[in-house]
Image (tube, grey):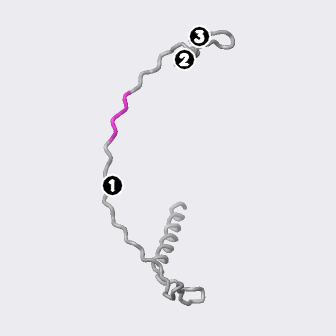
Amino acid sequence: MKKLLSVAIAAAFAATSFSAFAQKDVATKSGGEVTNKSGQAVTTKPVKERQKQGPMPKMPKQAEAPKKEPMQKSNVMTKDGKAVTTKSGGDVSSKK
């Protein structure tokens, strides 16, 4: 089902791009030619051809980052240098 839907969408895009590519002259609904202020016929700009790019260069693999040493437990201090305590009065230390 998904494949059928993707094929239908691809066909719709292809038809749209083909009709946009084929359109060169601009016309009114009644089929008359459209002109600019100076009286010249209005046409769409030609599509620029894109240059094909070669294959993308492969990026070198990055070196593995050195492993960080685990943080050791330490006492938590206030700005004044005093020990921090919990509400119940126990000492506080870092989790790791």
Q: Which residues are magenta?
A: 61-66
> Few, some or many C-alpha atoms within 10 Å of disc 3 (few <14, some 14-19, many ≥20)?
few
The image's mark for residue 56 is 1
- Mark 2 vs mark 3: in front: 3
Secondary structure, mark 3, is loop
Furthest residue toward right: 87
Badge 2 is on which residue? Answer: 94
Q: Quadrant of residue 34?
A: bottom right
Please indicate whether residue 92 sits to the left or right of residue 71 in the image.
right
Please indicate whether residue 74 sits to the left or right of residue 58 in the image.
right
Q: Hey, what amino acid is under mark 1?
A: Met
Q: Is residue 65 magenta?
A: yes
- Residue 86 position in % (x across, y down): 65, 13
The answer to which of marks 1 and 3 sits earlier in the sequence is 1
Please indicate whether residue 27 sits to the left or right of residue 65 in the image.
right
Residue located at (48% from left, 73% from top): 17
> Few, some or many C-alpha atoms within 10 Å of disc 2 (few <14, some 14-19, many ≥20)?
few
- Mark 2 vs mark 1: in front: 2
The image's mark for residue 82 is 3
Q: Hey, what amino acid is under mark 2?
A: Ser
The answer to which of marks 2 and 1 sits earlier in the sequence is 1
The answer to which of marks 2 and 3 sits earlier in the sequence is 3
Measure the alpha-carbon separation of dots 2 and 1.
48 Å
The image's mark for residue 36 is none
Q: Hey, what amino acid is under mark 3?
A: Lys
Measure the alpha-carbon separation of dots 2 and 3.
15 Å
Secondary structure, mark 2, is loop
Residue located at (47% from left, 79% from top): 44
- Mark 1 vs mark 3: in front: 3
- Residue 69 position in % (x across, y down): 42, 22
Q: Quadrant of residue 29?
A: bottom right
Residue located at (52% from left, 68% from top): 8
